[in-house]
Every structure is written in C-alpha cells, then in structure tokens.
Amino acid sequence: MVETLYQNVEQGMQKSNSALILAGHGSTLNPDSSDPTHLHAKTLRERGIFAEVHTCFWKEEPSFRQIYRMVESEEIYIVPNFISEGYFTQSILPRELGITGPLTECNGRTIKYCEPVGSHENMTGLLTQRAKEVAPGVPLAEMSLVIVGHGTGLNDNSAKAIRDQVERIQATGEFGEVVDAFMEETPAVAEWDVLTTREHVVVVPFFIADGLHSFEDIPVLLGIEKEPAGSLSQLGVFRKNPISLRGRQLYYASAIGTSPLLAEVILDQVRAFDARHALAEAAC
C-alpha cells in the first residue's frame, strides 16, 4: 500500500524556520477548484513541519503577487500544485513571484522553487492506489487502467507527464494493461473501449481537482452521462461504479489531486529540491 511509503516521514524533515507556499491555478467559474490545495495545505500545517504554510492562486485570492506579504519566514519553499511542467510553472509563476531560477535571493529572503507535484515519481503510487480503491475486489490482471489528461497542442509536457506515469505503471506489471487517453488529443478518451481489452476498465483523471472536466466533460466523453442539465454537485458520477457500458464494467475515479496522500508528494518535492541542491553544492 502507498501509505507504507510515508510512515514516519517527518523524521529528519523539520523546517521550523521555513515557510511552504502551495501555488495553484484556482478558478473564477468553479469554486471547488482550489479545495484540494487548501486541504493539503491544512494537512501540512497541522503536522507542524514548517513554520507556516500558505496557498496562493492565479485565478483566486490570495494571488501570486500578494502572497509574500503574508509570509514572515526568510526561507520559502514554493511547490506548484500543478500536474506538469508547462506555461504556468515555467512562465506565469516565475514572473508573478519574481523567481529567477531554482534559488532566488530577494529582499533578504531565499526562495526555493520546487518542481510541480505531478512530475514526481511517487505520483505513480497514488494512481495505482486510486485504481485499486475504485474497483475493490477486481483482480488487477483483469483490469485495464486508463489515465486521462486534458491534452493540448500548445504544450507537449501536459501529455508527457501522463505518458511517463503510464510507462512507470506498466513497468510494475501489476495491471492487465495501462493506457493513456486525452480529452483534446489522440488517443481520445471517448474511444476507451477501443483502446482497452479487459472486461473491467478503470478511468483515473490526472487532474489536480474535480471540476468541469472530471464532473462534466469526461463523463460525457466516456458515455456515462449525456450533456448534464443539473448542477455538478448533483451528478453523482463517482457513485455509480461499476457502470455497465459498451459490454464492459467501467469504473470512474475522482481526480488524482484530491487524494489525501498528495500532501506527501508535496513533501517529496521539497525533499527532492533539497537533495538536488545538496548535490549541486557538493559538485562546486
């Protein structure tokens, strides 16, 4: 189980003089978009590893540009709560937060800019656990696991993050098959029954939060829902498993970013930053 990876994680990791900032996208249309970021921040705040833990967003308050006013610590770790490297993590966040590289000295503060949560290798464990949770009792060898992303022609990193995870899960040999699928690229998630061969098909959205994509767009593409007329909260798309569809048993999970264990991956990225920085210093 993935939990065993994170027993006694606080040992050797006390940042009592440091602040942690989780930077998310947020939304002006979907009030639930920022919920996972707030939840993970609350979890980490309660564990007392950092002197302070804050959140900031592109589309909500507090904004990226406001957040430093709320921080007292002189050492700050920033972890982007994004699925992949891309426009936001490489352009928007550095510009808005005044970041010039992994290490930025600014106004007497040291800013340590970590990689986004979705790029860490331990996301693989979260994805496999989510698949097992949503289809309990189904032998993994009889299961097709579909990892779904948005996909875009503007940034190849979006698809690469998913394909990397698919390769890692395939390498474990646990599942009957593992495939990637996308909303706006090929292979298309709407063709999930063509892409897979097993009777039991588990679909896990590789998104940070449940929102319009996971509540509305993907269920329609899968064929679970017609164009929904009610509010998102009334759809109940995650409560229908398994769904008999196209001669298969289809299981649909909530977005991977809602997993409580994502808080551990955030810590993983802080550890990874410290490890890379220590190696860079040793090489000097």
Image: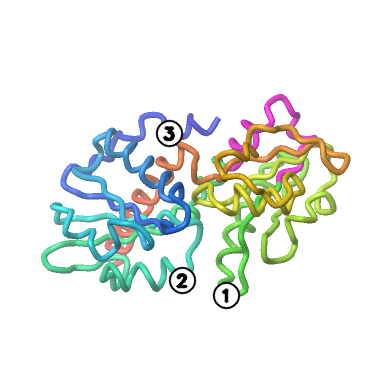
Most extreme residue toward the top is 137
* Residue that badge 1 annotates: 154
Give the residue at x 23% y 58%.
Answer: 67
Report the Cα–Cα distance between label 2 and label 1: 9 Å
* Residue that badge 3 annotates: 6
Which amino acid, by three-letter code, is at mark 2?
A: Tyr
Report the Cα–Cα distance between label 1 and label 3: 36 Å
How far across and how far down the image is residue 256, in percent? Answer: 54, 44
Give 211 or 45, whichever is nearer the viewer: 211
Which segment is the magenta one?
127-145
Which amino acid, by three-letter code, is at mark 1?
A: Leu
Is 132 in the magenta? yes
Query: Marks 3 and 2: which is nearer the front?
Result: 2
Task: Give the quarter of the figure containing the N terminus.
Answer: top right
Q: Residues within 10 Å of mark 3 (few under 14, many from 20)?
A: few
How far across and how far down the image is residue 142, in percent? Answer: 80, 35
* Residue that badge 2 annotates: 87
Figure quadrant of residue 93: bottom left
In the rendered structure, are the residues bearing label 2 and label 1 in contact, judged by CB atoms less than 8 Å apart? yes
Give 257 or 18, whichever is nearer the viewer: 257
Give the residue at x 70% y 48%.
Answer: 146
How far across and how far down the image is residue 197, in percent? Answer: 85, 45
Q: Taking 275 as reference, is 99 above or below it?
A: below
Upstream in sequence: badge 1 or badge 3: 3
Element under label 1? loop
Upstream in sequence: badge 3 or badge 2: 3
Q: Residues within 10 Å of mark 2 (few under 14, many from 20)?
A: few
